Image (cartoon, rainbow, N blue to C red):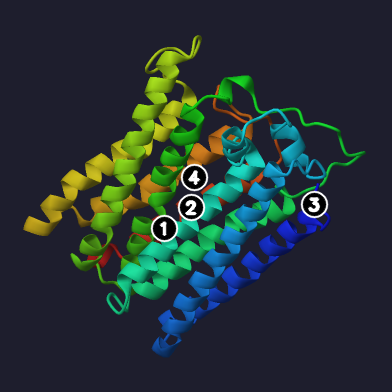
Amino acid sequence: MPAFDVPLLGTLLLGLVAISGAYTLAVSLGTAGGRPHWLSSARLGSYMTAALIVAALCVLAYAFQTHDFRIRYVARYSDRSMPWWYLLTSLWGGQDGSLLWWAFLLMGWTTACVWWMGDRFRELQPWVIATLMSILLFFVVVMLFAANPFATTPSSIPADGEGLNPLLQNYWMVIHPPTLYMGFVGWSVPFGFAVGALATGRLGNEWLKASRPWVLWAWLFLSVGLVLGMIWSYEELGWGGYWAWDPVENASFMPWLVGTAFLHSVIVQERYGMLRVWNVFLICFAFFMTIFGTFLTRSGLIASVHSFARSDIGIYFSWYLLFLGLACIALIVWRLPKL
């Protein structure tokens, strides 16, 4: 067991992520509000936030590899007999760790997007960064106040952990959830461009061209993740074959359907200038469905092999979904004359 206080270090890093993310959000909004010279600071802030998230994930991975059962999440989802690759999958095998994994992937997409934009899309860019930072802050707040992956065990430190669910100790667990998460989280970037287009009123084809590669990547990862899940379900006895119309399976399928519709309808807008409202709505709805799918697995509302145990964070997601839906509707209605 490590000599230093791993739980404290992990929680401290999450706190620094919150501070760095809030700073980046504020600077991005300041840039959008008429201070274009702040953009470089917003970009730097996003890189710093990403580095802190990577550090937090590495600390949790280190805790698993060293069997630091002072951490409740480590004690609950690992044991000393598990090989290192299953210890790695435990990062996303439970609720608290999966939220950190979500935030890690989000900052990976954010870093790639900020680097890719460079000096282009200068009017959209601060809104994209601000949107992605606001999403990150939601997940960090949930972790800090309701689902901290670095929370310590309330009583004595156990000699061994409970271990990962035997059904999840499968090689598909190494590749299926990360791929599916990549697809889920990837919709955040096109959503950021859609928010930027609505906020600035630049509702022509610029935001479509900017978001298209990110839509394609998100759609591709989600497609591969769904297929991998189908194969795993076919191999696992009692999981219903390739597709059992499980509630969470359906929730993960919805963003794929919406994204497929967008990839087709965007062609109509580019060629004929039609379906502008529809395309903005589709991107917003695709992102909404990724959050809704994440909520379903954590709310305790449905029974599913994909669901985590009932927890207290469902209420956080409920309020966030309400805010997200109302904000998207308000933005679209506000810009209807230009659409």
The label nearer to you, 1 versus 4, is 1
Q: Which quadrant holds residue 37? A: bottom left
Q: Which mark is residue 2?
A: 3
Q: Which residue is mark 2?
A: 105
- Can residue 273 be seen from the camera position used here? no
Identify the residue at the far top of this view. Answer: 237
The label nearer to you, 2 versus 4, is 2
Distance Cα–Cα, label 2 vs label 4: 14 Å
- Amino acid type at image mark 2: Leu
Ranked by sequence position, the earlier of labels 2 and 3 is: 3
Front-lying residue, 318 or 219: 219
Ranked by sequence position, the earlier of labels 1 and 4 is: 1
**Residue depicted at x 39% and y 44%:** 183
Q: Which mark is residue 109?
A: 1
**Residue depicted at x 58% and y 76%:** 23
- Amino acid type at image mark 1: Trp
Q: Position of residue 161 (x, y in %)?
A: 77, 31
Distance Cα–Cα, label 2 vs label 3: 27 Å
Secondary structure at badge 3 equals: loop
Q: Position of residue 32 (x, y in %)?
A: 41, 80
Q: Which quadrant holds residue 330? A: bottom left
